[in-house]
Image (spheres, grey):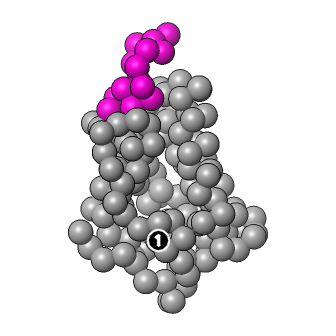
Amino acid sequence: MIAPEVGTVDGSLYERVGGNDGIRSATLAFEDRAAKDARINQKFARTDLDRLTKEFVDQVCQATGGPCTYTGRNMTETHANMGVTSGEFEAFIEDFIAVLDDFKVGQADQDQLVSFLRSFRGEIVEVDSSQDGTPLPSSFVPGPPL
């Protein structure tokens, strides 16, 4: 996300994080970071990255007050049979925060974005365990390609 000039708080969260271009840039940076993170990268083993990028950008864009409309599946359906642990969810959040830091997103805006993502915890986490780096179960069926 492209951070506005330091001290600027005008506009919607969408505008403050750089609009669609900023959200897309941060999403791509997050995907790169997640791919290198052994704590969570196995959960993306069969993910269509084009689909993930589009859906995540649309979801964050809509949540921040942008002009996008998220039309993807709900989080329960999307993550069914992934076996996501509490530890993996927290690692995901840590990676997301690190990307926000890299993009110099202010703390108040980070808090809003992280709160939005944390709101899906109950729909995503299937295993109450601090373990991370677990393999993607064979029963997981990814969403169809775009």
In the picture shown, does residue 138 fall above or below 102? below
Residue at x 50%, y 89% (from the top left corner): 138
Q: Residue furthest left?
A: 146
Residue at x 26%, y 73% (from the top left corner): 145
For the record, the magenta segment spans 2-19
In the picture shown, does residue 38 fall above or below 108? below
- In front of the other: 112 or 53: 112
Q: Is residue 43 magenta?
A: no
- Compared across the picture, whether 108 is left or right of 72 comes to right
Magenta stretch mostly in which secondary structure? loop
| SS at mark 1 in the image | helix
Q: Where does residue 128 sit, x and y in percent of width and height?
A: 75, 70
- Compared across the picture, whether 17 is left or right of 42 comes to left
Residue at x 54%, y 70% (from the top left corner): 76
Q: Quadrant of the C terminus?
A: bottom left
Residue at x 49%, y 74% (from the top left corner): 77
Instruction: Categorize mark 1 by other alpha carbons within 10 Å: few (<14), some (14-19), many (20+).
Output: some
In the rendered image, which residue does mark 1 sit on?
Answer: 78
Q: Is residue 3 magenta?
A: yes
- Compared across the picture, whether 61 is left or right of 9 comes to left
In the picture shown, does residue 1 fall above or below 92? above
